[in-house]
Each structure stands twice: as C-alpha cells, then as structure tokens.
Amino acid sequence: MPKLLSYSIINMVFHFLLHSHHGIQKASSFLVYPSNQAAVAAAQRMMRHTMNIPIYDCNLSRNTFLSESSSSSSHEEGHLQCQDNQHQQSMDDTQQPKPVPVHLVEGICAVNKPIGWTSQDVVGYLRGMLERDARSRGAELSKRRSRKSKHKVKVGHGGTLDPLATGVLVIGIGSGTKDLQQYLQGSKKYRAGVELGFETDTLDMAGERVKKMEWKHVQEKDIQSALLNQFTGNIMQKPPIYSAIRKNGKRLYEEARKGKTEDDLEIEARPVEIYNLEYLSHDQDGNTLPCFGLDVECGGGTYIRSLVRDLGNSLGTCATMTSLERTQQGPFTLEDALPKDLWNQETIYAEVEKWNAILSKSMPTSTTNDEHDNEEEEETNTLVEE
C-alpha cells in the first residue's frame, strides 16, 4: 500500500476514535495493515500523546509493541521512558515505610506531683518512660539530648512545685512544651497549712528553725482581717532565699547554701497578685490554732511560703508553711491530675489526647516558639512557683 494511503487510513481511524466517546472507552489498541514503519511510528506518537492507545503491527508477533525507527521517535520514546522512570520512583517513594513517630500524641496534660519529688524529677521520669516506649516502637532517637536534636522526646512542666509540695503539675509532651508559658503566668490555686510561733530558714518544714515567738495573742478574727486588708489584691512580695530565682546569674538557693543571707544578696520585693484568700480553721491534719489552713488563688510568680512569712509578721509573731498542695492550674484541677501509680505511656498519651480535644474548644493557639521550650534538664522558668 502506498505510503500516502497508509497515512490516510491511519488518520481516519485516529479521528474516528478521537471523536467517538464509545471508541475511547472501548478501544485499547488498533491494528495497521500492512506494516509501514514510518506511517505507523507517526500514528503511534499521535495516539500515545492524545489517547494512550498502543498500536500493534500484524506482521509482528501477537501483542508485541511496534518499535520506532526514526531518530525523532527514539527521542520521544526516551522522553516517555524518563517519565515512566520518574513515575515509578514516585511510586517507590510512596511505598517507603513512614518513620516511626517519636511521640504517639503531642499536647498537654496534668499529673499529681508526689511529695519529695522536684518538678524536674517528674519531667525526667516521664521523659525516660516515653523514650523507652519510643525505642520499643522502633522510633529513631538522638544518642545525646540537646536543644538542637531533632529526634528526641520532649517533656516539660508549666510551673515549679517545691519538693515538699504536692498537687497539679502541668506537663507538656512534644509540641505541647511550646504552650507551657501561659501556665507559668496564669492563675493557680493552693491549699496551705500554717503554724504560728516559729520560722525556718527555708520558710517550710524542710529547713531549720531560726526564730521563735509568742503567738497566743493572735485570734482568728485577726488573721481574717489581715488576709482581707493586707494580702488581697496587688502586693509586693520578697521571694524566699531558698528559691530557684536567679540573681547575678546564680540561683538564690545556691547562694544560701554557701551561707549568704537575704541582706547579703539584697533580694528585692516583686509585685504579685492575690485574687482570693480564705481562712480555714484547721490545717491538713485537723489541728487548730496555732495551726490553720489557707486557700489561695494567685497569679504567676507568687510564693506561698513568703505569704505565710509576711502574714506572721503582720500579726506580731512569726509563721511557717507546714504543707502545700496545688489544687488548680489553669483548667486543670486536682481531680484531673494523674496520680503517680497510674503513670505509664498508655495513660499519659490517653490524657494528652483527651485534653487536646478539650483545650482545642476553649483555648487560643499559642504563639510561643521552640526557643522558649521548658523541657530540658535545667529549669528555665522565668516565674518560679512554690
């Protein structure tokens, strides 16, 4: 068959299939008689670009694709082969197993800090537990912890509690560490035990008694009046010398252990806010005067030990904090705080997931960046609580 006729026949078939919806749906190939390599190659390129329909030559073995002989057709086929290789590579990439996540869930929850533990003890315990879980799942972790490590378990807390204090400690997991700053500065509630007549160097029961004074002239109405008139609202408060606040680059408690006094360090009073104070006629053990209790709602940076010290001074005696429990921090209450005997990776992640759902409905998204994360070994709190 002449070359021009071959082109005409192929062209007719091509246009028929192109304009026929039924043809496009049903036709997967068509045959060319007799074999004319140049004509077939031209049609093959048109079909391949337009409809992806392969062309077969009847003179070749059944279901064998025609080869293109011209240099231009070889270039086209090479280009198509390159596209096929890229597509195959893309498919291979999507079939690659995804890396195992370091954290199963990221966010915030609350735990009940046990007595005798520092806040960093809690952070270290939870981080070690979640690291062991991550490794057991095959997650890749950096060999050494640092702020620049990408593959690490991140855990932080939202406000220091002293070792002798118990109660609500807000914990951030993974990206949740970026939201902890709002809890450092937010409202907190405490229940404190107080005893009149003596004072320790640490202002709590962990220290040595350094002062003793008469207290029997103090009546309940005197305490209630002082709480309302002198210690509610915006007040100035001098932090305890045994605290983690930095002065001249050093922690106050480090200087106190070297024998330095408040006068030596020139500790300055700071503004704090007390939202509400309630007098309780008995302490945590049911004792009455000289023992009593206080329910305190305050802003960030408030020291309950200092509040008790200043209250004793205002009553013409001295006083020491005998117990402290944080009962609420932000939306987290004591009932929401996970007790120590329930700390495991399943319950921690379940609590984070639960609070993610709750907080997403009620709290704005934090804009704090990674540079202010509060999850490393050193306490980075700018506002240090009891």
Image (cartoon, rainbow, N blue to C red):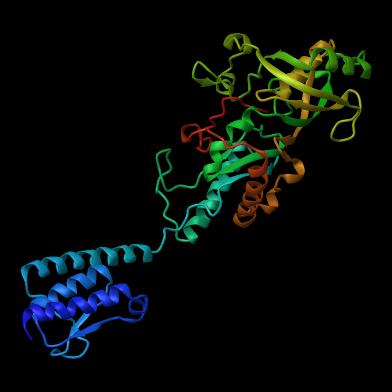
- Counting every numbered tag in the picture gives 0
The residue nearer to you, when weighing 171 against 53, is 53
- Among the 4 quarters of the image, the one containing residue 298: top right
Q: Is residue 383 above or below residue 222?
A: below
- For the residue pair 211 and 16, the one nearer the viewer reads as 16
Question: Which x, y percent locates residue 184?
Answer: 62, 30
The x, y position of residue 187, in whole percent, is 70, 29
Work out which quarter of the rendered image holds the N terminus and state it: bottom left
Quarter of the picture containing the C terminus is: top right
| Residue 209 appearing in the image | no
Which residue lies at the image location 25% right of the left edge and 74% below the top edge?
15
Q: Is residue 41 above or below residue 373?
A: below
Q: Is residue 105 above or below residue 251?
A: below
> In the rendered image, which quarter is residue 115 located in?
top right
Residue 306's x, y, as percent? 72, 19
Give left or right: position of 211 versus 293. Answer: left
Image-based side of 228 in relation to 96, left or right: right
| Viewer can see residue 220 | yes
Q: Where is residue 316 shown, x and y percent of the image?
A: 84, 10
The foreground one among 275 and 54 is: 54
At 59% from the left and 40% from the top, the residue drawn is 121
Q: Quadrant of residue 117?
A: top right
Residue 139 in the figure: left or right of residue 217:
left
